[in-house]
Image: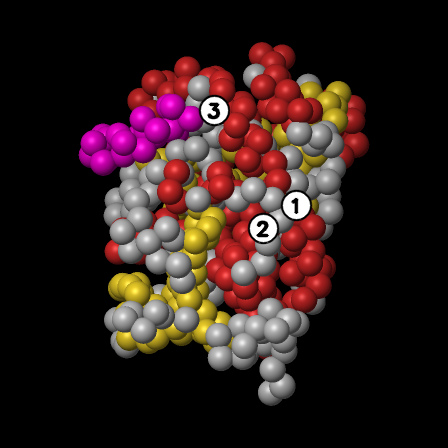
C-alpha cells in the first residue's frame, strides 16, 4: 500500500489512540490524513460503545451549558424524584459530590456566560469539521443537513428557553422561533396537541446511524495505514527514551505519542500520568421502536419539558432520555425510560403499537463545566487528551479530531484552546 501523506510529518511518527468511539475514530482519520502511523486500541468493536446510542444530532448552536441557574434551582426535584430528569443513586452520592459541587459552581451566571463563549468556537465549526472528515471517508451521505428542532407544549416551558435564546443570539447562532403551523410543516406526523411552539436551528446536522459514521471514519484511517488492536488498555506511561508505553491485557507497546479518547474511562489514564480531572458519567438511556417502514420523523425532535428526544434512526425511532449519576459499575435501571414509551406513542401516533426492539444505556463522559478536555498533558508532552464531551460527543468529535491532529503536528492553534485544558481542574 502506498502511504498517504499530506505534509512533512516523518513516516516513522507513531500515535496510539486509546478509545474507539466516534472521537477516537475521527482522530485516527485526522492524524492518518496527516501521515501519522496510527494505532487505535480498545476492548470492544469500533463505534460499539457510548457513541452508538446518541440522538444523532450535530448541533451547531449548542452554546448553552448543562449547568444553568434554572437547572440548579431544579436539582432537588431532579435528583430526588424517581421519575425526574436526572437521578442520583443514593449509593453513589458521596463519590459524585465533588463533581456535583463543581457543577453547581459552573451554573452561576458569570460562569455560564464564559462557558458559552468557550463552547461557541467548537460547536459552530462542528458541522464543517464533520463534512471535511466525511469527504475523506466517502461518508457524506450519512450526514443530513436537516437541522435541530425542539418543541414546547406550554408557554411556561417555552419561557424557559429565554437564556438559551439569549446565548444563541449573543454568539450568532442561526435559529428561528416557530409557531404550531410552522412546526407542523417541518414534522407533519407529530401529534398537533403535543406542541404550541418550536425552536429550530437549520444549520445543524443529523446522523441516523452513528455507528456507521464512526466505522466509516476508522475505515478511511485504515486505508491510510491505521490499525486496530482489540485489547483492554491497562496503563499509559512515559518511557525513559521520551516515548509512551501502552500496556494492555495482552502486551506492552511503545509509541511516540498517545491520544486518550476513552470517554468516561479516560480519568484513570489521566491519573496515571499525574493529571487531575473532574469527570463523571451522566448515564443516558434509550429505547428503540421497530421501524414502520415509513418516514415518521425527518430529524431529531427534542421535548425539553419531558427531557427527551425522538430520533428517526436507521432501524426505527429512538427515544433518548435520562441523566443518571451512578458511576461506571452500577447496573442499568430501565424503569424510567420504559415508562416514557406511552409518551412517545402519544406525540408520534404513527408508532402505533410498534414493538420496542432494543433497550440501551451509555456512559456520557461529562465534566461539570460542560467543556471537553482537549489538549496536551501538562505532565507528559507526548500525551494528548480528547474526552469529556458529555451530551456533545457526536457533535464535537470531528472538530476535536482536527484540533488534536493539529496539536500533535505542532500546528498553530486555530483559536484559543486554553478553556479546554485539563489544568483547569
Image vertical order of residue 83 relative to residue 156, above or below: below
Q: Give the residue at x 48% y 75%.
A: 13
Q: Position of residue 401 (x, y in %)?
A: 55, 56
| Residue count near mark 1 (Cα–Cα under 10 Å), binned few <14, some 14–19, many ≥20 | some
**In terms of image quadrants, where is residue 303?**
top right
Q: Mark 3 points at which residue?
A: 111
The residues tagged by marks 2 and 3 sit, at their Cα atoms, a distance apart of 24 Å
96 in the magenta segment? yes
Pick the residue in front: 312 or 32.
32
- Quarter containing the C terminus: top left
Say whether disc 2 or disc 3 marks the residue closer to the N-terminus: 3
Pick the residue in front: 156 or 389.
389
Query: In the image, is 157 to the left or to the right of 171?
Result: left
Residue mark closest to the camera, 1 vs 2: 2
Q: Mark 2 points at which residue?
A: 413
Image vertical order of residue 363 relative to residue 210, above or below: above
Q: Give the range drawn in magenta.
A: 86-106
Say whether disc 1 or disc 3 marks the residue closer to the N-terminus: 3
Q: Could you tell me which secondary element the residue under label 2 belongs to? A: loop
Q: Name the residue under label 1.
A: 125
Amino acid at each position: 500500500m502506498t502511504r498517504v501523506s499530506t505534509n512533512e510529518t516523518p513516516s516513522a511518527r507513531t500515535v496510539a489512540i486509546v478509545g474507539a468511539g466516534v472521537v477516537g475514530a475521527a482522530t485516527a482519520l485526522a492524524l492518518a490524513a496527516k501521515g501519522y502511523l496510527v494505532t487505535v486500541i480498545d476492548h470492544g468493536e469500533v463505534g460499539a460503545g457510548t457513541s452508538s446510542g446518541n440522538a444523532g444530532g450535530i448541533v451547531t448552536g449548542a452554546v448553552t451549558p448543562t449547568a444553568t441557574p434554572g437547572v440548579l434551582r431544579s436539582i432537588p426535584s431532579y435528583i430526588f424524584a424517581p421519575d425526574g430528569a436526572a437521578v442520583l443513586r443514593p449509593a453513589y452520592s458521596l463519590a459524585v459530590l465533588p463533581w456535583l459541587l463543581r457543577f453547581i459552581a459552573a451554573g452561576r451566571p458569570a460562569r455560564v456566560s464564559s462557558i458559552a463563549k468557550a463552547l461557541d468556537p467548537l460547536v459552530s465549526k462542528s458541522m464543517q469539521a464533520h463534512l471535511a472528515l466525511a469527504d475523506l471517508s466517502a461518508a457524506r451521505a450519512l450526514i443530513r443537513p436537516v437541522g435541530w428542532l425542539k418543541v414546547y407544549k406550554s408557554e411556561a416551558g417555552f419561557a424557559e428557553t429565554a437564556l438559551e435564546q439569549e446565548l444563541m443570539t449573543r454568539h450568532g447562532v442561526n435559529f428561528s422561533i416557530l409557531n404550531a403551523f410552522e412546526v407542523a410543516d417541518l414534522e407533519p406526523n407529530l401529534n398537533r396537541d403535543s406542541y404550541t411552539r418550536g425552536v429550530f436551528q437549520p444549520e445543524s446536522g443529523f446522523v441516523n446511524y452513528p455507528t456507521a459514521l464512526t466505522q466509516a471514519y476508522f475505515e478511511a484511517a485504515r486505508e491510510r495505514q491505521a490499525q486496530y488492536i482489540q485489547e483492554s488498555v491497562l496503563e499509559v506511561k512515559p518511557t525513559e527514551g521520551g516515548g509512551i508505553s501502552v500496556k494492555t491485557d495482552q502486551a506492552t507497546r511503545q509509541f511516540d505519542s498517545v491520544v486518550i479518547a476513552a470517554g468516561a474511562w479516560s480519568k484513570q489514564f489521566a491519573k496515571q500520568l499525574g493529571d487531575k480531572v473532574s469527570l463523571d458519567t451522566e448515564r443516558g438511556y434509550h429505547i428503540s421502536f421497530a421501524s414502520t417502514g415509513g418516514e415518521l420523523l425527518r430529524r431529531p425532535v427534542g421535548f425539553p419539558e419531558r427531557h427527551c428526544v425522538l430520533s428517526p434512526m436507521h432501524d426505527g425511532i429512538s427515544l433518548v432520555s435520562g441523566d443518571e449519576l451512578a458511576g461506571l459499575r452500577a447496573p442499568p435501571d430501565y424503569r424510567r425510560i420504559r415508562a416514557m414509551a406511552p409518551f412517545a406513542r402519544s406525540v408520534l401516533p404513527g408508532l402505533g403499537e410498534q414493538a420496542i426492539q432494543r433497550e440501551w444505556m451509555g456512559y456520557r463522559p461529562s465534566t461539570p463545566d460542560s467543556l471537553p478536555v482537549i489538549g496536551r498533558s501538562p505532565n507528559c508532552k507526548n500525551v494528548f487528551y480528547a474526552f469529556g464531551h458529555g451530551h456533545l460527543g457526536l457533535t464535537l468529535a470531528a472538530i476535536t479530531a482536527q484540533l488534536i491532529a493539529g496539536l500533535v503536528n505542532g500546528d498553530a492553534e486555530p483559536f484559543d484552546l486554553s478553556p479546554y485544558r485539563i489544568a483547569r481542574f
